[in-house]
Amino acid sequence: MYLLSIKGGYKLSGEVKICGAKNAALPSIACSILSKKPVNIKNIPEVEDIKTICKLLENLGSSCKFIKSHQVKIDTTTINSTKATYDIVRKMRASILVLGPLLARFHHCEVSLPGGCAIGQRPIDLHLSALEKMGAKIEIKEGYVVATTPKDGLKGANIIFDKITVTGSENIIMAAALANGTTKIINAAKEPEVVALCEILSQSGVDIKGIGTSELIIKGSSGKLLDIKEINVIPDRIEAGTYLCAGAITNSQITVKNVNPNHLVAVLDKFESMGYGIKIDGDCITILPAKKIKPIEIITSEYPGFPTDMQAQFMALCLVANGTSVIDERLFENRFMHVSELLRMGADIKLNAHIATINGGIKLNATDVMATDLRASSALVLAGLVANGTTRVHRIYHLDRGYEKLEAKLSKLGAKIKRLEE
């Protein structure tokens, strides 16, 4: 077990290169199950969640080899099992992404009910009901989703999601790619990671209309495996936003490189509303210090709205604003777990159901805090950058699930941060 030790009060400067998006890499890896040949995936972040899904595929009989830094070659032609076991799936909710492609290709699979961050129920009912509409028989047995298709496989269907679901959309998109007939998905997620998956499949010969919209029409291949080309994972907009928050909370000028600014419009708007300058140059974004840091109001929503995965980081940032900020978390019912730890550092935050009121301008004091989930962990690190004294963030395995070499990148920017054994 490791912790991060952070000595607060230092300005940051310089540049940081952003990795490929974990949340785009995971469905990219899962969709390799649909391929008739090995798939090379480039710009893969070297984080724990990637190791987890690779281990899952290996347990199914696949080969997953890192052939060079940030590049993995996956061969699913050797799959000899369609049971995704609890010991791996429990580590990461996104493991459920293998359900759609396994079922579409092999007509039967067993996938353990998922684990991962404890930020709400995030039920998979929407995934299962959609697959049932495509002809699958679904049962829950001893903690496993047991799914079977008719003899000739899944069939196209009209799918209407009652609620927008990113992984649900991705699962059904992959299932529809091999289905018989045409699938129409209404109220599909529009996140860049979903768009990237659609583009991968489109480039592999799948006829997909409506990419980037909430209505997708997918003509299935009737069970024919795909010729998936080399995949280049899109940049991680959440990692980029987190480092921009590091620059903002220390009121410093830093630049994030290898990003797509179009994926960060809602986040950049909030920085500017707080008084920070934003400069965009190609795939680089520079944040400039604010003369006065202003409070803001944030309502989380599905893309292209403000991402829930940036809520915790902006809550930490609101602690240095001059005035009262309000954050309304609309997507998850239990995503304020970082608040109790920030309170231990002296923060003034009041909760009323899904609304947090943050009174900024109060100096934070370093102490020992405990990470509870991936993004909450990053909020505690950000708070540690400006706290008086040395903050120790425990249970950083949550951070390692989604951030590659966080302490090394922050150190390069000038932060006094190091990883220590517990």
Image (cartoon, helix red, strand yellow):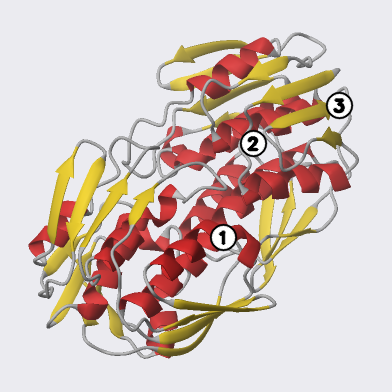
- The kind of secondary structure element at disc 1 is helix
322 to 359, vertically: above or below: below
372 to 147, vertically: above or below: below
Mark 3 vs mark 1: which is more N-terminal? 3
Distance between mark 3 and mark 1 Cα atoms: 32 Å
- Mark 1 or 2, which is nearer the eye? 1
Q: Residue at x 56, y 73 (%)?
A: 18
Identified by mark 3, the residue type is Lys
397 to 38, vertically: above or below: below
- Residue 131 locus on image (x, y percent): 64, 18
State left or right for residue 163 relative to residue 134: left
Q: Nearer the viewer, residue 210 or 384?
A: 210
- Residue 394 locus on image (x, y percent): 21, 64
Q: Give the residue pinned by disc 3.
A: 219
Q: Nearer the viewer, residue 114 or 339?
A: 339
Q: Nearer the viewer, residue 360 or 2?
A: 360
**Disc marking residue 265:** 1
Mark 1 vs mark 2: which is more N-terminal? 2
Distance between mark 1 and mark 2 Cα atoms: 23 Å
- Mark 3 or 1, which is nearer the eye? 1
Q: Residue at x 32, y 86 (%)?
A: 415
Q: Give the residue pinned by disc 2.
A: 170
- Residue 405 locus on image (x, y percent): 45, 74
State left or right for residue 60 relative to residue 202: left
